[in-house]
Amino acid sequence: MSLIASDHFRIVVGLGKSGMSLVRFLAQRGVSFAVADTRENPPELATLRRDYPQVEVRCGELDVEFLCRADELYVSPGLALATPALQAAAARGVKLSGDIDLFARNAKAPIVAISGSNAKSTVTTLVGEMAVAAGKRVAVGGNLGTPALDLLSDDVELYVMELSSFQLETTNHLGAEVATVLNVSEDHMDRYSGLPAYHLAKHRIFRGAKQVVVNRQDALTRPLMSEGQPCWTFGLSAPDFKAFGLREENGEKYLAFEFQNLMPVRELKVRGAHNQANALAALALGHAVGLPFDAMLASLRNFTGLEHRCQWVRELDGVSYYNDSKATNVGAALAAINGLGMDMDGKLILIAGGDGKGADFSGLRDSVAKYCRAVVLMGRDAGLIADALGDAVPQVRVGSLDEAIAQSRSLALPGDAVLLSPACASFDMFKNYEERGQLFARAVEVLA
Protein backbone atom coordinates (compact mmCIF):
# COMPACT_ATOMS: atom_id res chain seq x y z
CA MET A 1 0.00 0.00 0.00
CA SER A 2 1.53 3.35 -1.03
CA LEU A 3 1.65 6.03 1.67
CA ILE A 4 0.45 8.83 -0.61
CA ALA A 5 -2.98 10.45 -0.84
CA SER A 6 -4.26 10.02 -4.40
CA ASP A 7 -6.95 12.73 -4.22
CA HIS A 8 -4.44 15.61 -4.08
CA PHE A 9 -2.80 17.31 -7.07
CA ARG A 10 0.99 17.42 -7.23
CA ILE A 11 3.59 18.99 -9.50
CA VAL A 12 7.03 17.51 -10.19
CA VAL A 13 9.42 20.48 -10.59
CA GLY A 14 12.49 19.42 -12.58
CA LEU A 15 12.61 16.72 -15.23
CA GLY A 16 16.01 15.13 -14.80
CA LYS A 17 16.80 11.64 -13.49
CA SER A 18 15.07 12.01 -10.10
CA GLY A 19 12.16 13.93 -11.69
CA MET A 20 11.53 11.08 -14.10
CA SER A 21 11.60 8.57 -11.22
CA LEU A 22 8.92 10.70 -9.51
CA VAL A 23 6.81 10.65 -12.70
CA ARG A 24 7.00 6.83 -12.86
CA PHE A 25 6.19 6.50 -9.14
CA LEU A 26 3.16 8.83 -9.22
CA ALA A 27 1.81 7.41 -12.50
CA GLN A 28 1.99 3.82 -11.18
CA ARG A 29 -0.09 4.87 -8.17
CA GLY A 30 -2.75 6.76 -10.11
CA VAL A 31 -1.87 10.10 -8.51
CA SER A 32 -2.97 13.27 -10.31
CA PHE A 33 0.11 15.35 -11.23
CA ALA A 34 1.77 17.67 -13.73
CA VAL A 35 5.41 18.53 -14.51
CA ALA A 36 7.31 21.83 -14.70
CA ASP A 37 10.93 22.61 -15.59
CA THR A 38 12.84 25.88 -15.85
CA ARG A 39 14.62 24.62 -18.98
CA GLU A 40 13.03 24.78 -22.43
CA ASN A 41 14.26 21.27 -23.27
CA PRO A 42 14.91 19.26 -20.07
CA PRO A 43 16.83 15.93 -20.35
CA GLU A 44 13.81 13.60 -19.94
CA LEU A 45 11.22 15.58 -21.93
CA ALA A 46 11.14 13.20 -24.92
CA THR A 47 10.74 10.18 -22.59
CA LEU A 48 7.90 11.88 -20.69
CA ARG A 49 6.00 12.76 -23.88
CA ARG A 50 6.46 9.25 -25.28
CA ASP A 51 5.55 7.26 -22.14
CA TYR A 52 3.09 9.65 -20.41
CA PRO A 53 1.48 11.77 -23.17
CA GLN A 54 -1.49 12.58 -20.88
CA VAL A 55 0.71 14.41 -18.33
CA GLU A 56 0.70 18.22 -18.58
CA VAL A 57 4.23 19.64 -18.79
CA ARG A 58 5.33 23.29 -18.73
CA CYS A 59 8.86 24.31 -19.71
CA GLY A 60 10.59 27.65 -19.19
CA GLU A 61 10.12 30.23 -16.45
CA LEU A 62 8.12 28.83 -13.50
CA ASP A 63 4.53 30.12 -13.33
CA VAL A 64 3.53 30.79 -9.71
CA GLU A 65 -0.21 30.49 -10.45
CA PHE A 66 0.35 27.10 -12.06
CA LEU A 67 2.48 25.91 -9.10
CA CYS A 68 -0.24 27.05 -6.66
CA ARG A 69 -2.70 24.60 -8.21
CA ALA A 70 -0.78 21.85 -6.39
CA ASP A 71 -1.04 20.69 -2.78
CA GLU A 72 2.59 19.60 -2.90
CA LEU A 73 5.60 20.33 -5.12
CA TYR A 74 8.26 17.64 -5.55
CA VAL A 75 11.30 19.81 -6.22
CA SER A 76 14.37 18.50 -8.08
CA PRO A 77 17.63 18.61 -6.06
CA GLY A 78 19.13 20.68 -8.88
CA LEU A 79 16.73 23.59 -8.21
CA ALA A 80 17.40 25.82 -5.19
CA LEU A 81 14.47 26.20 -2.79
CA ALA A 82 15.32 29.92 -2.72
CA THR A 83 13.99 30.18 -6.32
CA PRO A 84 11.43 33.05 -6.10
CA ALA A 85 8.57 31.10 -7.72
CA LEU A 86 9.00 28.23 -5.21
CA GLN A 87 9.13 30.68 -2.30
CA ALA A 88 5.98 32.41 -3.56
CA ALA A 89 4.14 29.07 -3.79
CA ALA A 90 5.33 28.07 -0.29
CA ALA A 91 4.12 31.42 1.10
CA ARG A 92 0.66 30.56 -0.24
CA GLY A 93 0.61 27.23 1.60
CA VAL A 94 1.95 24.81 -1.01
CA LYS A 95 4.16 22.14 0.58
CA LEU A 96 7.73 21.81 -0.81
CA SER A 97 8.95 18.22 -0.77
CA GLY A 98 11.24 15.89 -2.71
CA ASP A 99 11.80 12.32 -3.84
CA ILE A 100 13.70 11.28 -0.68
CA ASP A 101 10.77 12.24 1.57
CA LEU A 102 8.46 10.16 -0.61
CA PHE A 103 10.96 7.29 -0.63
CA ALA A 104 11.23 7.33 3.18
CA ARG A 105 7.44 7.23 3.55
CA ASN A 106 7.24 4.12 1.34
CA ALA A 107 10.41 2.14 2.22
CA LYS A 108 9.62 -0.95 4.31
CA ALA A 109 13.22 -2.02 5.01
CA PRO A 110 15.83 -0.27 7.21
CA ILE A 111 17.77 2.61 5.61
CA VAL A 112 21.50 3.30 5.94
CA ALA A 113 21.76 7.02 5.10
CA ILE A 114 25.13 8.53 4.12
CA SER A 115 26.04 12.14 3.44
CA GLY A 116 29.18 14.29 3.68
CA SER A 117 31.18 16.74 1.63
CA ASN A 118 33.49 13.94 0.45
CA ALA A 119 33.77 10.14 0.22
CA LYS A 120 30.02 9.44 0.39
CA SER A 121 30.00 7.47 -2.90
CA THR A 122 32.93 5.32 -1.78
CA VAL A 123 31.41 4.58 1.64
CA THR A 124 27.93 3.96 0.16
CA THR A 125 29.38 1.49 -2.37
CA LEU A 126 31.42 -0.25 0.34
CA VAL A 127 28.45 -0.70 2.70
CA GLY A 128 26.40 -2.05 -0.23
CA GLU A 129 29.11 -4.59 -1.07
CA MET A 130 29.40 -5.58 2.61
CA ALA A 131 25.64 -6.22 2.73
CA VAL A 132 25.82 -8.36 -0.42
CA ALA A 133 28.71 -10.35 1.09
CA ALA A 134 26.54 -10.88 4.19
CA GLY A 135 23.79 -12.39 2.01
CA LYS A 136 21.38 -9.44 2.26
CA ARG A 137 19.01 -8.37 -0.51
CA VAL A 138 20.27 -4.80 -0.70
CA ALA A 139 19.37 -1.77 -2.84
CA VAL A 140 22.00 0.96 -3.27
CA GLY A 141 21.38 4.40 -4.78
CA GLY A 142 19.96 7.88 -4.20
CA ASN A 143 22.48 10.51 -5.24
CA LEU A 144 24.65 7.67 -6.60
CA GLY A 145 23.38 5.53 -9.47
CA THR A 146 19.70 4.59 -9.28
CA PRO A 147 17.21 7.27 -8.07
CA ALA A 148 15.66 6.46 -4.69
CA LEU A 149 12.09 5.81 -5.84
CA ASP A 150 13.25 3.33 -8.48
CA LEU A 151 14.75 1.20 -5.69
CA LEU A 152 11.49 0.64 -3.79
CA SER A 153 10.60 -3.05 -3.60
CA ASP A 154 8.99 -5.36 -1.03
CA ASP A 155 11.89 -7.74 -1.71
CA VAL A 156 14.59 -5.41 -0.36
CA GLU A 157 16.02 -6.15 3.12
CA LEU A 158 18.30 -3.10 3.39
CA TYR A 159 18.58 0.26 1.61
CA VAL A 160 21.98 1.96 1.42
CA MET A 161 21.49 5.56 0.32
CA GLU A 162 23.91 8.30 -0.66
CA LEU A 163 22.21 11.66 -0.07
CA SER A 164 23.39 15.12 -1.11
CA SER A 165 22.70 18.35 0.77
CA PHE A 166 20.42 19.34 -2.15
CA GLN A 167 18.30 16.20 -1.66
CA LEU A 168 18.22 16.69 2.10
CA GLU A 169 16.85 20.26 1.80
CA THR A 170 13.45 18.76 0.89
CA THR A 171 13.71 15.80 3.30
CA ASN A 172 11.64 16.43 6.43
CA HIS A 173 11.76 13.05 8.17
CA LEU A 174 14.05 10.31 6.88
CA GLY A 175 13.80 7.91 9.83
CA ALA A 176 16.96 6.00 8.89
CA GLU A 177 18.10 2.98 10.89
CA VAL A 178 21.56 4.59 10.95
CA ALA A 179 22.65 7.96 9.52
CA THR A 180 26.00 9.67 9.11
CA VAL A 181 27.56 12.88 7.82
CA LEU A 182 31.10 11.66 7.07
CA ASN A 183 32.73 15.11 7.01
CA VAL A 184 31.82 18.76 6.46
CA SER A 185 33.88 21.23 4.42
CA GLU A 186 32.94 24.15 2.17
CA ASP A 187 31.10 23.08 -0.98
CA HIS A 188 28.34 24.57 -3.14
CA MET A 189 28.97 28.02 -1.69
CA ASP A 190 27.35 29.35 -4.87
CA ARG A 191 24.06 27.90 -3.52
CA TYR A 192 24.38 28.41 0.26
CA SER A 193 24.78 31.65 2.21
CA GLY A 194 27.75 30.12 4.03
CA LEU A 195 29.05 27.03 5.82
CA PRO A 196 26.35 27.15 8.59
CA ALA A 197 23.52 26.90 6.01
CA TYR A 198 25.25 24.01 4.20
CA HIS A 199 25.90 22.28 7.56
CA LEU A 200 22.20 22.60 8.52
CA ALA A 201 21.12 21.04 5.21
CA LYS A 202 23.47 18.07 5.72
CA HIS A 203 22.22 17.49 9.28
CA ARG A 204 18.61 16.97 8.12
CA ILE A 205 19.81 13.39 7.46
CA PHE A 206 19.63 12.73 11.23
CA ARG A 207 15.90 13.50 11.53
CA GLY A 208 14.26 10.42 13.04
CA ALA A 209 17.48 8.34 12.88
CA LYS A 210 17.58 5.41 15.33
CA GLN A 211 21.43 5.31 15.42
CA VAL A 212 24.16 7.72 14.32
CA VAL A 213 27.76 7.36 13.14
CA VAL A 214 30.12 10.27 13.84
CA ASN A 215 33.61 11.20 12.59
CA ARG A 216 35.73 11.75 15.73
CA GLN A 217 38.05 14.06 13.79
CA ASP A 218 35.31 16.41 12.55
CA ALA A 219 33.15 18.11 15.20
CA LEU A 220 30.74 19.32 12.50
CA THR A 221 29.58 15.73 11.89
CA ARG A 222 28.15 15.32 15.40
CA PRO A 223 24.38 15.92 15.57
CA LEU A 224 22.26 16.96 18.52
CA MET A 225 21.20 13.56 19.86
CA SER A 226 18.42 12.33 22.07
CA GLU A 227 19.48 10.66 25.30
CA GLY A 228 20.23 6.96 24.88
CA GLN A 229 20.48 7.16 21.07
CA PRO A 230 23.21 4.69 20.01
CA CYS A 231 26.26 6.51 18.62
CA TRP A 232 29.23 4.84 16.92
CA THR A 233 32.39 6.74 15.97
CA PHE A 234 35.20 6.33 13.46
CA GLY A 235 38.55 8.05 13.03
CA LEU A 236 42.26 7.49 12.46
CA SER A 237 43.08 7.53 16.19
CA ALA A 238 43.03 4.46 18.46
CA PRO A 239 39.42 3.48 19.21
CA ASP A 240 37.76 2.97 22.58
CA PHE A 241 34.15 1.92 23.34
CA LYS A 242 31.66 1.92 20.42
CA ALA A 243 34.47 3.18 18.19
CA PHE A 244 36.37 2.15 15.05
CA GLY A 245 39.93 3.34 14.42
CA LEU A 246 43.58 2.41 13.85
CA ARG A 247 45.79 0.46 16.26
CA GLU A 248 49.48 -0.26 15.95
CA GLU A 249 51.05 -3.50 17.14
CA ASN A 250 54.65 -4.64 16.51
CA GLY A 251 55.06 -1.97 13.83
CA GLU A 252 51.92 -3.14 11.96
CA LYS A 253 48.87 -0.85 11.57
CA TYR A 254 45.41 -2.42 11.97
CA LEU A 255 41.80 -1.46 11.38
CA ALA A 256 40.30 -1.98 14.83
CA PHE A 257 37.00 -2.00 16.73
CA GLU A 258 37.15 -1.03 20.41
CA PHE A 259 40.12 -3.06 21.69
CA GLN A 260 40.13 -5.71 18.96
CA ASN A 261 42.31 -5.68 15.82
CA LEU A 262 40.24 -6.55 12.73
CA MET A 263 42.70 -6.63 9.80
CA PRO A 264 46.09 -5.17 8.81
CA VAL A 265 45.84 -1.88 6.88
CA ARG A 266 48.28 -3.29 4.26
CA GLU A 267 45.55 -5.74 3.14
CA LEU A 268 43.49 -2.85 1.76
CA LYS A 269 43.92 -2.46 -2.02
CA VAL A 270 43.12 1.29 -1.82
CA ARG A 271 45.91 3.64 -0.70
CA GLY A 272 45.96 6.60 1.66
CA ALA A 273 44.78 7.63 5.12
CA HIS A 274 41.49 8.95 3.67
CA ASN A 275 40.68 5.46 2.35
CA GLN A 276 41.45 3.97 5.77
CA ALA A 277 38.92 6.44 7.23
CA ASN A 278 36.38 5.40 4.55
CA ALA A 279 36.88 1.72 5.46
CA LEU A 280 36.34 2.50 9.16
CA ALA A 281 33.18 4.53 8.41
CA ALA A 282 31.76 1.65 6.35
CA LEU A 283 32.55 -0.82 9.15
CA ALA A 284 30.75 1.41 11.68
CA LEU A 285 27.64 1.71 9.51
CA GLY A 286 27.60 -2.00 8.67
CA HIS A 287 28.07 -2.97 12.32
CA ALA A 288 25.19 -0.67 13.33
CA VAL A 289 22.80 -2.66 11.08
CA GLY A 290 24.14 -6.03 12.21
CA LEU A 291 26.41 -7.05 9.32
CA PRO A 292 28.96 -9.68 10.46
CA PHE A 293 32.64 -8.70 10.57
CA ASP A 294 33.85 -11.60 8.40
CA ALA A 295 31.65 -10.48 5.45
CA MET A 296 32.58 -6.80 5.93
CA LEU A 297 36.33 -7.51 6.08
CA ALA A 298 36.16 -9.76 3.00
CA SER A 299 34.55 -6.85 1.10
CA LEU A 300 37.28 -4.46 2.25
CA ARG A 301 40.01 -6.83 1.04
CA ASN A 302 38.40 -7.00 -2.42
CA PHE A 303 37.58 -3.30 -2.83
CA THR A 304 39.68 -1.55 -5.50
CA GLY A 305 38.08 1.91 -5.21
CA LEU A 306 35.73 3.88 -7.44
CA GLU A 307 36.52 5.44 -10.79
CA HIS A 308 37.68 9.10 -10.55
CA ARG A 309 38.12 8.86 -6.76
CA CYS A 310 41.86 8.72 -6.05
CA GLN A 311 42.00 5.92 -8.61
CA TRP A 312 45.49 4.61 -9.43
CA VAL A 313 45.98 4.83 -13.21
CA ARG A 314 49.56 3.62 -13.81
CA GLU A 315 53.22 3.90 -12.84
CA LEU A 316 55.79 5.29 -15.31
CA ASP A 317 59.48 6.01 -14.61
CA GLY A 318 58.90 5.38 -10.90
CA VAL A 319 56.02 7.91 -10.76
CA SER A 320 52.40 6.90 -9.92
CA TYR A 321 49.47 8.70 -11.56
CA TYR A 322 46.15 9.13 -9.69
CA ASN A 323 42.78 10.23 -11.11
CA ASP A 324 40.81 12.06 -8.41
CA SER A 325 38.60 14.05 -10.79
CA LYS A 326 35.63 13.61 -8.40
CA ALA A 327 37.40 16.07 -6.03
CA THR A 328 35.15 18.97 -7.05
CA ASN A 329 35.68 20.89 -3.78
CA VAL A 330 38.53 21.90 -1.48
CA GLY A 331 37.73 19.30 1.19
CA ALA A 332 37.86 16.43 -1.31
CA ALA A 333 41.20 17.62 -2.70
CA LEU A 334 42.58 17.94 0.83
CA ALA A 335 41.51 14.37 1.64
CA ALA A 336 43.49 13.09 -1.37
CA ILE A 337 46.54 15.33 -0.79
CA ASN A 338 46.78 14.44 2.90
CA GLY A 339 45.78 10.80 2.43
CA LEU A 340 48.34 10.05 -0.29
CA GLY A 341 50.95 12.45 1.09
CA MET A 342 51.00 10.74 4.49
CA ASP A 343 51.28 7.35 2.86
CA MET A 344 54.28 7.85 0.50
CA ASP A 345 57.97 8.71 0.66
CA GLY A 346 58.04 11.03 -2.37
CA LYS A 347 56.11 14.22 -3.09
CA LEU A 348 52.95 15.04 -5.07
CA ILE A 349 52.63 17.01 -8.28
CA LEU A 350 49.09 18.37 -7.93
CA ILE A 351 46.95 19.23 -10.98
CA ALA A 352 44.14 21.56 -9.87
CA GLY A 353 41.71 24.16 -11.16
CA GLY A 354 38.35 24.60 -12.88
CA ASP A 355 35.11 26.20 -11.69
CA GLY A 356 35.60 26.91 -7.97
CA LYS A 357 31.87 27.45 -7.17
CA GLY A 358 32.74 30.43 -4.96
CA ALA A 359 35.04 28.41 -2.67
CA ASP A 360 37.85 29.73 -0.47
CA PHE A 361 41.06 27.94 -1.57
CA SER A 362 43.26 29.13 1.32
CA GLY A 363 42.63 25.84 3.17
CA LEU A 364 44.81 24.05 0.60
CA ARG A 365 47.98 26.00 1.41
CA ASP A 366 49.37 24.10 4.42
CA SER A 367 48.85 20.62 2.96
CA VAL A 368 50.23 21.67 -0.44
CA ALA A 369 53.32 23.12 1.28
CA LYS A 370 53.79 19.89 3.25
CA TYR A 371 53.15 17.22 0.61
CA CYS A 372 53.56 18.78 -2.86
CA ARG A 373 56.65 19.38 -4.97
CA ALA A 374 54.75 21.66 -7.36
CA VAL A 375 51.21 22.61 -8.44
CA VAL A 376 50.03 22.70 -12.06
CA LEU A 377 46.99 24.98 -12.45
CA MET A 378 44.40 25.14 -15.24
CA GLY A 379 40.85 26.36 -15.82
CA ARG A 380 38.78 29.39 -14.98
CA ASP A 381 39.73 29.80 -11.32
CA ALA A 382 43.45 28.88 -11.65
CA GLY A 383 44.32 32.46 -10.67
CA LEU A 384 42.29 32.29 -7.45
CA ILE A 385 44.07 29.07 -6.43
CA ALA A 386 47.45 30.57 -7.34
CA ASP A 387 46.76 33.59 -5.12
CA ALA A 388 45.58 31.42 -2.22
CA LEU A 389 48.69 29.18 -2.39
CA GLY A 390 51.12 32.09 -2.69
CA ASP A 391 54.72 30.90 -2.49
CA ALA A 392 53.89 27.56 -0.78
CA VAL A 393 55.37 25.61 -3.75
CA PRO A 394 56.39 26.34 -7.35
CA GLN A 395 53.39 26.88 -9.65
CA VAL A 396 52.91 26.27 -13.37
CA ARG A 397 49.90 27.65 -15.31
CA VAL A 398 48.67 25.67 -18.34
CA GLY A 399 45.90 25.98 -20.92
CA SER A 400 44.86 22.33 -21.30
CA LEU A 401 44.77 18.95 -19.54
CA ASP A 402 47.36 17.48 -21.95
CA GLU A 403 49.72 20.34 -21.16
CA ALA A 404 49.10 19.78 -17.43
CA ILE A 405 50.09 16.12 -17.74
CA ALA A 406 53.23 16.95 -19.76
CA GLN A 407 54.34 19.60 -17.23
CA SER A 408 53.61 17.27 -14.28
CA ARG A 409 55.65 14.49 -15.84
CA SER A 410 58.66 16.80 -16.29
CA LEU A 411 58.40 18.02 -12.65
CA ALA A 412 58.03 14.58 -10.99
CA LEU A 413 60.96 12.58 -9.57
CA PRO A 414 61.03 8.78 -9.03
CA GLY A 415 58.94 7.97 -5.93
CA ASP A 416 56.60 10.94 -6.56
CA ALA A 417 52.97 10.82 -7.64
CA VAL A 418 51.01 12.99 -10.09
CA LEU A 419 47.57 13.68 -8.62
CA LEU A 420 44.64 15.13 -10.59
CA SER A 421 42.55 16.48 -7.69
CA PRO A 422 41.09 19.73 -9.04
CA ALA A 423 39.26 21.12 -5.93
CA CYS A 424 36.85 22.54 -8.56
CA ALA A 425 33.91 21.57 -10.73
CA SER A 426 34.71 20.79 -14.35
CA PHE A 427 32.05 22.69 -16.26
CA ASP A 428 34.34 25.47 -17.52
CA MET A 429 36.37 22.98 -19.64
CA PHE A 430 34.58 19.60 -19.63
CA LYS A 431 31.08 18.10 -19.75
CA ASN A 432 31.44 16.76 -16.18
CA TYR A 433 34.03 15.38 -13.76
CA GLU A 434 33.74 11.92 -15.37
CA GLU A 435 34.83 13.26 -18.76
CA ARG A 436 37.72 15.14 -17.11
CA GLY A 437 38.86 11.96 -15.34
CA GLN A 438 38.48 9.74 -18.42
CA LEU A 439 40.53 12.14 -20.56
CA PHE A 440 43.22 12.28 -17.86
CA ALA A 441 43.39 8.47 -17.52
CA ARG A 442 43.45 7.99 -21.31
CA ALA A 443 46.25 10.55 -21.78
CA VAL A 444 48.31 9.03 -18.96
CA GLU A 445 47.85 5.47 -20.28
CA VAL A 446 49.35 6.39 -23.68
CA LEU A 447 52.43 8.18 -22.27
CA ALA A 448 55.50 6.54 -23.79
Image: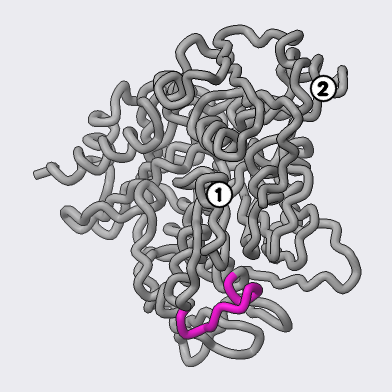
Does the rendering let one see residue 391? no
**Which of these two is toward me, 362 or 390?**
362
Residue 361 badge: none
> In the rendered structure, which amino acid carries the disc numbered 2?
Ala
Task: Give the percent coordinates (x, y) of residue 164.
Answer: 61, 43
SS label for mark 2:
helix
**Which of these two is toward me, 370 or 209?**
209
Q: CA distance from mark 2 to mark 1?
A: 32 Å
**Which of these two is toward me, 352 or 256?**
256
Q: Which range is magenta?
A: 286-295
Which residue does the image show at 50% across and 59% down from the upper left?
A: 139
Which residue does the image show at 64% across and 55% down from the upper left?
A: 107
SS label for mark 1:
loop
Tell me the residue that label 2 is attached to.
90
Q: Split into 4 quadrants, where in the image is the C terminus?
A: top left
Which residue does the image show at 75% across and 14% down from the upper left?
A: 84
Residue 118 badge: 1
* Image quarter of residue 230: bottom right
**Left-right relation of 200 to 415:** right
* Image quarter of residue 266: bottom left
Q: Earlier in the sequence, mark 2 or mark 1?
A: 2
> In the rendered structure, which amino acid carries the disc numbered 1?
Asn
